[in-house]
Image (cartoon, rainbow, N blue to C red):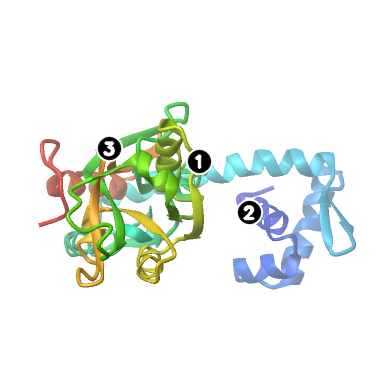
Amino acid sequence: MDVRTLRYFVEVVRQQSFTRAAEKLFVTQPTISKMLRNLEDELECTLLVREGRRLRLTDSGQALYQRGLTILEEFRQLKAELQDINGLKRGQLRLGVPPMVGTQMAPLIGEFRQRYPGIELIISEFGGLTVQQAVLSGELDLALTALPVDPDLPITSQLLFSHPLCIVVPRTPYWLNRTSVAIAELAEQSILIYNEDFALYRLLIDAFHAHGFTPKIAARSGQWDFLAAMVQTGMGVAILPEPICQRLDSQQLLWIPLAPTLLWQLGLIWRQGSYLSQSAQAWIAHSRELWPDDQSGYPR
């Protein structure tokens, strides 16, 4: 059994299809079928049983699949270490970026590419909680997410910047001349909020519960501009980071700081104890250049 055969087997299980696995791996379906038959002959056991349109793992198949995931991850890390022998002339960096901050990260991404043109950036846009799981599973090398993360998770974090959260409301007499809005006041408001896979969602829900109420959620979305548009139609109020609010239409909307202050802290995360490639280390170092420890804010 070699690594290639193991990769074919794992992909068939993931895709629940020989055909889809073949497409994913850019080989023919008969090639995968033959290699898995040879693998079963070599191990002298049945690994997969077809049940209708699904493939069920036998006990032996389950053991091989779980161990195979670990072996393939170890092999990926070995390849990453070997690539680092050539320094930063080539390589990949798998980075998770929440949709909310994609535009703000463009200067950092642009400067990084200019400095390290040989490194391929593979950027995934997901909510903060989703990228946390992707970092833990090894699917991402680094990710940006709201801090703090769960202290029980094996994750290392580095704070990049911190900004206050503001309530976004229509420009109506009720809200004019307000200099702050107490979080407790939001108990009577219809709330427009991010989807549950966003770390900001959990931050806000925890804050609401700490002030003794469960919010009246009118709608959820993964897009800050859509949340703002719903505020403009009168559906409810939203809570967004102050830099995002600066991009809204000030002729139609107001944004008012919350009281007490609730901070949106964004940072880099990576898995504790995992090998950090030279490209990942370069990204961390470059981030520190733009956001020194004693400062806060977006790239210059």
Of the two numbered discs 3 and 2 on the same chain, state the one appearing first in sequence: 2
Viewed as shown, does residue 289 lie left or right of 27?
left
Q: Position of residue 40 (x, y in %)?
A: 82, 50
Residue at horizontal 49 percent and vertical 59 percent from the top: 220
Considering depth in this image, is 215 or 123 the residue closer to the camera?
215
The answer, for residue 286, to whether it is visible in the render is yes
Which labelled disc corresponds to residue 119? none
Residue closest to the far front = 173
Asked where in the image residue 223 lies, by quadrant, the reply is bottom left
Label 1 and label 2: CA atoms lie apart by 47 Å
- Mark 3 or 1, which is nearer the eye? 1
Viewed as shown, does residue 96 lie left or right of 5?
left
* Amino acid type at mark 1: Thr
Q: Which residue is mark 3?
A: 158
Residue at horizontal 28 percent and vertical 58 percent from the top: 174
Q: Position of residue 254 (x, y in %)?
A: 24, 61
Q: Are marks 1 and 2 in contact (CB under 8 Å)?
A: no
Considering depth in this image, is 182 or 270 the residue closer to the camera?
182
- Mark 2 closeness class: few <14, some 14–19, many ≥20 residues within 10 Å: some
* Amino acid type at mark 3: Gln
- Mark 3 closeness class: few <14, some 14–19, many ≥20 residues within 10 Å: some
- Mark 1 closeness class: few <14, some 14–19, many ≥20 residues within 10 Å: some
Callout 3: SS: strand
Callout 1: SS: loop
* Amino acid type at mark 2: Arg
- Mark 3 or 2, which is nearer the eye? 3
Which labelled disc corresponds to residue 7? 2
Q: Which residue is mark 1?
A: 214
Q: Indicate whether 169 appears above or below 132.
A: below
Callout 2: SS: helix
